[in-house]
Image (cartoon, rainbow, N blue to C red):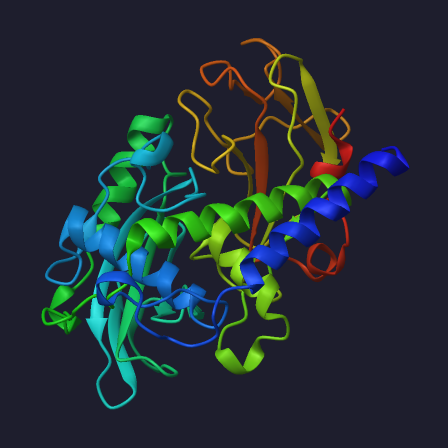
């Protein structure tokens, strides 16, 4: 990259960050009495938008809202950067005496529950079967994200059917649904505009640095960089913290030319649960026809390395086809149950080998 282009990118980042940081620092009322969005409350506002989306689409504060198939493509999805390797179930529950209770049934697939607070923190990621009662921080309700893997079966249809069957095992009698939950009075059109500003900053950072890596602090006390935290919530809300062999690591790539065949070849990172590569459009939504490649099913080379192809034709190894989008795209790598080596690496081993 030329020094001139680097300077332009750096200037763009500074300009965008200044626009984000120039917002008022109080929760004064805006037009029509809505809460003004600022750096201090952005993640709370974006989390409220996710609450709104799932309550509107699935009445998640009244029932266990299950997406019966893989997430929708494009902006029909309730959340940006949804993974393409699991089905989702969501419940909005009350916190009682500082704790929340939920059930994880015995299953035959990857199955986890993430406990997300009203401030957007994924405070817990649980994979063990059983009834769990856990403490949560600074929140009256929680947003539970169930993820049920589609890896069991000889094809995608069987995998989806199995994942759905596992979600239906959840004992919802353990849930204290937040039926009286009232959304904070944000103007959600303004929230979305603020999200888009920060997603643009993320894109600029990726073009400058080659990657954008998510840290997802689990509580407010763990935030070391408020700007970074807000960027993470804008570009990838709902991700889990990178904890060795327990949590996940997520990395965004620079834009990849949608008109060329490109590949990446790498050594299997050997994450505890699975590794996946998913393509997204410029707004960070899934692309029609572009199916994620993951370590449950990818084809391995003779030397034990893995090659993933992008727009290289049906006969190409582990091919992800983004042609329905017809534009440059990005990928996100997911390391579920990330190893220490993956967490410690500055550059993602999959993204850095794209050619």
Q: Would you identify the image quadrant in which residue 320 lies?
A: top right
Which residue in the rendered view is the most extreme toward the front? 31
Expressed as whole percent of the image width and height from the top left, the position of residue 15 reads: 66, 51
Left or right of 169, for residue 14: right
Expressed as whole percent of the image width and height from the top left, the position of residue 183 reads: 21, 65
Q: Is residue 340 shown to the viewer in this render?
A: yes
Depth check, front residue: 53 or 61: 53
Residue visible at 50% across and 67% down? 39
Expressed as whole percent of the image width and height from the top left, the position of residue 79 reads: 36, 47
Left or right of 86, for residue 100: left
Depth check, front residue: 284 or 352: 284
Residue visible at 33% across and 66% down? 129
Does residue 286 lie above or below 327 as drawn? below
Q: Would you identify the image quadrant in which residue 133 lies?
A: bottom left
Q: In which quadrant of the rendered image does the C terminus lie?
A: top right
Residue visible at 38% across and 49% down? 192
Q: Is residue 114 shown to the viewer in this render?
A: no
Q: Would you identify the image quadrant in which residue 71 lies?
A: top left
Does residue 332 lie above or below 339 as drawn? above
Left or right of 83, for residue 259: right
Does residue 59 lie above or below 80 as drawn? below
Q: In which quadrant of the rendered image does the N terminus lie?
A: top right
């Amino acid at each position: 990259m030329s020094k001139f282009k680097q300077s332009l990118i750096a200037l763009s980042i500074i300009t965008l960050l200044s626009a984000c940081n120039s917002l008022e620092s109080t929760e004064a009322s805006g037009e029509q009495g809505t809460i003004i969005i600022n750096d201090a409350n952005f993640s709370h506002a974006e989390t409220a938008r996710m609450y709104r989306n799932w309550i509107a689409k699935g009445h998640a504060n009244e029932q266990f809202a299950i997406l019966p198939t893989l997430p929708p493509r494009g902006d029909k999805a309730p959340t940006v950067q949804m993974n393409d390797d699991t089905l989702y179930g969501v419940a909005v529950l009350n916190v009682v005496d500082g704790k929340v209770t939920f059930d994880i049934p015995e299953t035959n697939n990857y199955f986890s529950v993430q406990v997300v607070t009203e401030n957007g923190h994924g405070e817990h990621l649980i994979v063990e079967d059983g009834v769990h009662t856990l403490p949560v921080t600074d929140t009256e309700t929680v947003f539970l994200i169930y993820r049920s893997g589609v890896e069991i079966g000889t094809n995608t249809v069987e995998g989806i059917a199995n994942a759905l069957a596992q979600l239906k095992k959840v004992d919802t009698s353990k849930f204290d649904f937040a039926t009286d939950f009232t959304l904070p009075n944000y103007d959600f059109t303004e929230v979305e505009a603020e999200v888009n500003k920060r997603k643009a900053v993320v894109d600029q950072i990726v073009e400058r640095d080659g990657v954008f890596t998510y840290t997802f602090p689990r509580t407010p006390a763990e935030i070391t960089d408020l700007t970074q935290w807000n960027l993470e919530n804008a570009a990838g809300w709902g991700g889990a913290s990178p904890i060795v062999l327990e949590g996940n690591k997520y990395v965004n790539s620079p834009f990849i030319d949608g008109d060329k065949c490109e590949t990446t070849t790498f050594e299997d990172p050997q994450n505890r649960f699975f590794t996946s590569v998913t393509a997204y459009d410029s707004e960070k939504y899934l692309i029609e026809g572009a199916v994620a490649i993951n370590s449950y099913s990818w084809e391995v080379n003779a030397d034990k390395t893995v090659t993933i192809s992008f727009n290289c034709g049906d006969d190409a190894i582990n091919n992800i086809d983004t042609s329905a989008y017809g534009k440059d795209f990005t990928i996100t790598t997911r390391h579920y149950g990330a190893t220490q080596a993956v967490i410690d690496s500055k550059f993602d081993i999959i993204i850095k080998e794209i050619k």
